[in-house]
Image (tube, grey):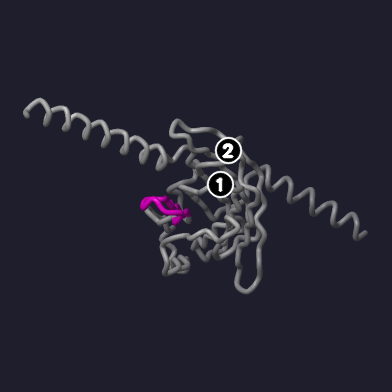
Amino acid sequence: MYTHNKIHAKLLVVAATMALTVNFTLADDLTPPAYRGDPLSVFAHWQNIDGTANLTLTDFTFQDDTDPSTTLHPLVPIDYIIPSPNHEYKFHLPNFIDKMPIKYMRLQLTWTGNPLPPTGLILSGVEGVSGVPGNVVFTSPVNPLATGAFYQYYDIEFMPNPDMERWSVFLPDNAFLVQAVTDTVSTVPEPATITTLMLGSLLFLRKRS
């Protein structure tokens, strides 16, 4: 009887360890941006925690710059994401209402099933009553994880800086999102972006003259 209970206890420990390992791997924040925790930065983590296709907001943090005129757009009342029948996941990320000219976003996605990357990503910032399209400036390769899931991240720029972001991701058939990690920061453009803006302005002025 004692031996049987001992073996049973060992099996429970092994099963619990495997479950924790899987959950930890799926919850792993593989490529956080360098600006996380900077003033006017927002971090949000959605995760599949109930075994369904839904994603639940499991972590959310933001850093203010102590300027009383800077406010954070409130989080939507629901804290879960339900995919539509065409495998579209819709997200709404609150952000700071501020006077910075640009917003950077890093979006990390983890999914299971089909190893193919997402078939579409729609980015739509909202500045007052105007829409602001997001520009993907870098897409990482698809990386397989030890759990059998797949991972990819995107670096995105919004200009002008919107008050909030809405984004949708479309997955291929038989693929299910198990994690989404989003970081944003309101700031001034990086030097490379400033150079691109200056060149664009020069070309615009040249066409007008």
Q: Amino acid at mark 1?
A: Asn
> Residue sitting at 42 percent across and 58 percent down?
64
Using the image, determine if residue 117 lies above or below residue 188: above
Residue at the left extreme? 2
Residue 148: x %, y % from top left? 47, 34
Does the magenta-highlighted stretch encompass residue 44? yes
- Secondary structure, mark 1, is loop
Taking the magenta stretch, the answer to whether it contains residue 163 is no
**Percent x, y for residue 167?**
58, 58
Q: Nearer the viewer, residue 106 or 71?
A: 106
Percent across and percent down for residue 138 are: 64, 41
Residues drawn in magenta: 41-54
Looking at the rendered structure, which numbered label has been put on residue 115? Answer: 2
Where, by quadrant of the figure, is residue 6 drawn? top left
Residue 174: assigned label: 1
Secondary structure under tag 2 reads loop
Q: Residue type at mark 2?
A: Pro
Q: CA distance from mark 1 to mark 2?
A: 9 Å
Residue at 42%, 54% (x, y): give it: 52
First in sequence: mark 1 or mark 2?
A: 2
**Rendering coords of residue 203 (x, y %):** 85, 52
Image position of 57 (left or right of 94): left
